[in-house]
Image (cartoon, rainbow, N blue to C red):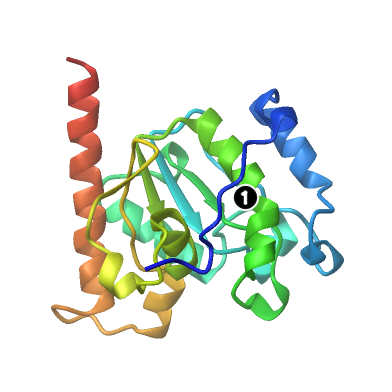
C-alpha cells in the first residue's frame, strides 16, 4: 500500500556538498514551507556525527521549539528512559524529526511540509551513515517504508531502506497517552523493541569488526 508520503526526489546538489555544520546553518534559516511563519526556532537534531543509531520523530513540540533541541519535553524524557533500559545513552545516538519546525498546535506534519524538509533529512542521513534508523510513530515509519499501514502493524520488525536497517517503534508521546504497563501494552512492547534494536546494533558492530 502506498503512503501519503510516497514520493521520490533527486538529491539536491548544493546540499550534498555541505558538511554537517554547514547543513545545520542552512537549516537554521530555512524558508521552504509555511512552518517558518509560526516557529520560534529551527530544531535540526542532536547527537554524534557520524551516528550508528538514528531516531526520527514527526516534528518538534512546544519545548523543542523554544530550546532548539529535539525530544526534550515529556516525550523526550521518556525516550531517555527507553534508551537507558537497553544500556544506550542519549549522547551516543542522533535524534531528529521529519520536519525541523514545530507544526502549529503539534499537529501532524502535512505532506508538502515533509517534502520540503526531506532534502535536509536525506543530507543528514548521508553524513550520519547510520547502521539502524528508528522511525518513531506513523509519519516517519510510513514515509521510509512507503506504506499506509499503521505503526501498530509495523513496529517490532526490521526493514531495509537504501541498505540501512529500519526498525519502527511507537512514538514516546503515544506511550504517554497510553500508560498501561501490562504484557502486550504499548509500553511493554516498546521496552521489548528497544532491546531488539540494541541486540541488532551489537550484531552489526561485531560484523563490522570482522
Which residue lies under the disc numbered 1? 118
Q: Between 174 and 124, which is closer to the camera in this rendering?
A: 124
Question: Left of 34 or right of it: where is 83?
Answer: left
**Residue at disc 1, secondary structure:** helix
Q: Quadrant of residue 189?
A: bottom left
Decide if residue 48 is in sight here: no
Q: Between 38 and 6, which is closer to the camera in this rendering?
A: 6
- Badge 1 density bin: few <14, some 14–19, many ≥20, Cα 10 Å: some
Residue at 69%, 35% (x, y): give it.
Answer: 12
**Residue 207, how many percent across, how many down?**
18, 23
Q: Quadrant of residue 79?
A: bottom left
Question: Left of 45 or right of it: where is 157?
Answer: left
Q: List the single residue furthest toward the left.
A: 183
Q: Taking 146 as reference, is 208 above or below it? A: above
**Residue 20, how many percent across, how many down?**
65, 29
Q: Give the tally of numbered discs.
A: 1
Residue at 24%, 44% (x, y): give it.
Answer: 198
Q: Quadrant of the N terminus?
A: bottom left
Residue at 71%, 60% (x, y): give it.
Answer: 101
Q: Between 187 and 29, which is closer to the camera in this rendering?
A: 29
Q: Quadrant of residue 201?
A: top left
Q: Taking 181 as reference, is 93 above or below it? A: above
Q: Taking 106 as reference, is 8 above or below it? A: above
**Residue 84, how many percent across, how many down?**
32, 52
Q: Quadrant of the C terminus?
A: top left
Question: Left of 192 or right of it: where is 56?
Answer: right
Residue at 44%, 33% (x, y): give it.
Answer: 51
Decide if residue 6 is in sight here: yes
Amino acid at each position: 500500500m502506498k503512503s501519503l508520503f510516497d514520493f521520490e526526489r533527486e538529491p539536491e546538489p548544493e546540499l550534498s556538498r555541505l558538511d554537517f555544520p554547514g547543513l545545520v546553518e542552512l537549516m537554521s534559516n530555512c524558508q521552504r514551507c509555511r512552518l517558518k511563519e509560526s516557529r520560534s526556532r529551527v530544531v535540526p537534531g542532536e547527537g554524534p556525527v557520524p551516528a550508528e543509531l538514528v531516531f526520527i520523530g514527526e516534528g518538534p513540540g512546544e519545548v523543542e521549539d523554544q530550546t532548539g533541541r529535539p525530544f526534550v519535553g515529556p516525550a523526550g524524557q521518556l525516550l531517555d528512559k527507553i534508551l537507558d533500559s537497553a544500556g544506550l545513552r542519549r549522547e551516543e545516538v542522533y535524534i531528529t524529526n521529519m520536519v525541523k519546525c514545530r507544526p502549529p498546535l503539534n499537529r501532524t506534519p502535512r505532506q508538502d511540509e515533509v517534502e520540503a524538509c526531506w532534502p535536509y533529512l536525506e543530507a543528514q542521513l548521508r553524513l550520519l551513515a547510520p547502521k539502524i534508523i528508528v522511525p518513531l510513530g506513523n509519519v516517519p515509519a510510513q514515509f521510509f517504508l512507503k506504506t499506509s499501514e499503521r505503526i501498530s502493524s509495523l513496529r517490532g520488525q526490521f526493514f531495509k531502506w537504501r541498505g540501512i536497517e529500519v526498525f519502527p517503534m511507537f512514538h514516546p508521546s503515544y506511550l504517554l497517552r497510553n500508560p498501561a504497563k501490562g504484557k502486550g501494552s504499548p509500553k511493554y512492547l516498546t521496552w521489548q523493541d528497544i532491546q531488539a534494536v540494541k541486540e541488532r546494533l551489537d550484531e552489526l558492530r561485531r560484523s563490522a569488526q570482522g
